[in-house]
């Protein structure tokens, strides 16, 4: 294989995946992990470009150069960082950047030693970079057996890269340049393609999950919509009963006089009022509970681990927070809300509980609004 092909083929592959990743990054709203993976392919392609320029200036094939290896190292760090970002874990960006800078300084010092044999100098640079990759793997690696998959994969990427650098160092010292060219064409290009295809598959899965989540989320308030609530509550209650849960409760909340807000202040103020009401409810909903907008100004809460009286106290807190008047004359109007609450029986259905809570809400409205009523399990 011509020496130029060893450089041009991976450079073209990196360019194609960079373009594809850019499109995914743009469609995903500039997601952080997509950005890290995009930069990984950018710096990989940049390494091959620098190697091509070095080869052209030297009028011979230059491999492996320190610039290329440092770009590969940066790509492995960015790949590991993207994994952590995808898992919503701390990305350790400062730590990884410090390791890369330290490794680069180490390689630079090695070059300043002016080792006459370029092959030996390249092999030693690979060993230095392998050491940096091992340190990075330890820095972002798992701290326990129960660590997240992102921690294990991030460490594995850098450990695998360290092993690759050590194998290349051995190959440089033992094999002629023509053999190195063949190894490069047979292993590195498929490896780049495999990484690119895997990343694209992950991003396609993320986009599909995002679209699925949007179909189950209320666009205005950011809480679940009716479809998302029904499906999510079903799975939540299945786990709840399977683990022997004893307490659960349901509440339905409704803004009092919401039509008047729209009529007197406009629909924009009505939307702001709904968003503020949802945010207030979100503040008292537990991390394992569900909050949904069923439609209009009506919201539902499914709380796990507490009974109706305990959920009633939470709704009383929401009611008191809503009654605080606004100090901004141009701000949203002061609102009140009515609530119906019930305990979810261990052998009862969610639909029955919602019906009881809805009847309690109707009574709260009939009794003058701005109150929380508790419906007993056996009836009102």
Image: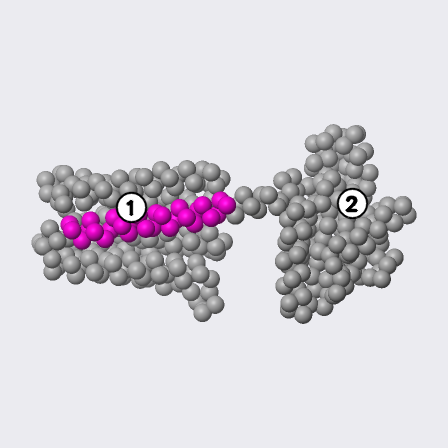
Looking at the image, which residue is at 43% across and 49% down?
A: 202
Q: Earlier in the sequence, mark 1 or mark 2?
A: 1
Does residue 104 show up magenta in the picture? no
Position above or below: 148 against 14: below
Looking at the image, which residue is at 26% across and 61% down?
A: 163
Residue 112 in view of the camera: no
Q: Residues within 10 Å of mark 1 (few under 14, many from 20)?
A: many
Question: Picture coordinates of residue 33 (x, y %)?
Answer: 44, 48
Pointer 1 residue: 44
Looking at the image, which residue is at 89% across and 46% down?
A: 366
Question: Picture coordinates of residue 18 (x, y %)?
Answer: 34, 40
Question: Picture coordinates of residue 375 (x, y %)?
Answer: 84, 57
Pointer 2 residue: 254
Q: Circle 1 sits in a helix, a strand or a loop, which is it?
A: helix
Quarter of the rendering occupied by the C terminus? bottom right
Position above or below: 107 against 39: below
Looking at the image, which residue is at 33% across and 53% down?
A: 76
Quarter of the rendering occupied by the N terminus? top left
Q: Residue 264: which disc?
A: none
Boundaries of the magenta span: 181-208
């Amino acid at each position: 294989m011509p020496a130029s092909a060893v450089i041009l083929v991976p450079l073209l592959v990196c360019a194609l995946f960079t373009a594809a990743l850019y499109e995914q990054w743009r469609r995903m709203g500039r997601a952080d992990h997509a950005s890290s993976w995009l930069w990984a392919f950018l710096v990989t392609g940049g390494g091959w470009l620098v190697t091509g320029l070095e080869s052209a200036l030297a009028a011979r094939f230059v491999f492996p150069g320190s610039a290329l290896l440092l770009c590969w190292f940066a790509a492995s760090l960015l790949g590991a960082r993207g994994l952590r970002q995808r898992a919503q874990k701390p990305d350790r960006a400062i730590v990884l950047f410090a390791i890369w800078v330290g490794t680069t300084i180490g390689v630079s010092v090695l070059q300043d030693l002016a080792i006459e044999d370029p092959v030996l100098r390249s092999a030693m640079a690979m060993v230095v970079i392998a050491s940096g990759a091992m340190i990075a793997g330890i820095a972002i690696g798992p701290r326990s057996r129960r660590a997240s998959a992102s921690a294990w994969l991030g460490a594995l990427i850098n450990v695998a890269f360290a092993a690759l650098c050590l194998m290349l160092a051995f190959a440089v010292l033992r094999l002629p340049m023509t053999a190195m060219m063949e190894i490069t064409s047979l292993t590195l290009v498929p490896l780049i393609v495999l990484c690119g295809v895997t990343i694209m598959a992950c991003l396609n899965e993320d986009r599909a999950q995002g679209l699925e989540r949007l179909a189950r989320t209320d666009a205005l308030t950011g809480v679940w919509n009716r479809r998302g609530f029904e499906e999510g509550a079903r799975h939540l209650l299945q786990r709840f009963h399977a683990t022997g849960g004893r307490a659960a409760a349901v509440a339905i909340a409704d803004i009092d006089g919401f039509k008047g807000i729209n009529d007197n202040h406009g629909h924009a103020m009505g939307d702001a009022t709904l968003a503020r009401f949802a945010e207030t409810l979100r503040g008292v909903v537990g991390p394992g509970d569900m909050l949904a907008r069923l439609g209009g100004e009506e919201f539902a809460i499914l709380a796990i681990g507490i009974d109706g009286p305990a959920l009633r106290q939470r709704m009383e807190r929401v009611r008191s927070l809503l009654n605080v008047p606004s100090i901004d004359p141009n701000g949203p109007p002061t609102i009140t809300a009515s609530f119906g609450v019930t305990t979810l029986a261990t052998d009862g259905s969610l639909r029955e509980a919602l019906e009881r809570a809805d009847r309690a809400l109707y009574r709260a409205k009939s009794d003058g609004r701005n109150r929380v009523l508790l419906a007993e399990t056996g009836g009102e």
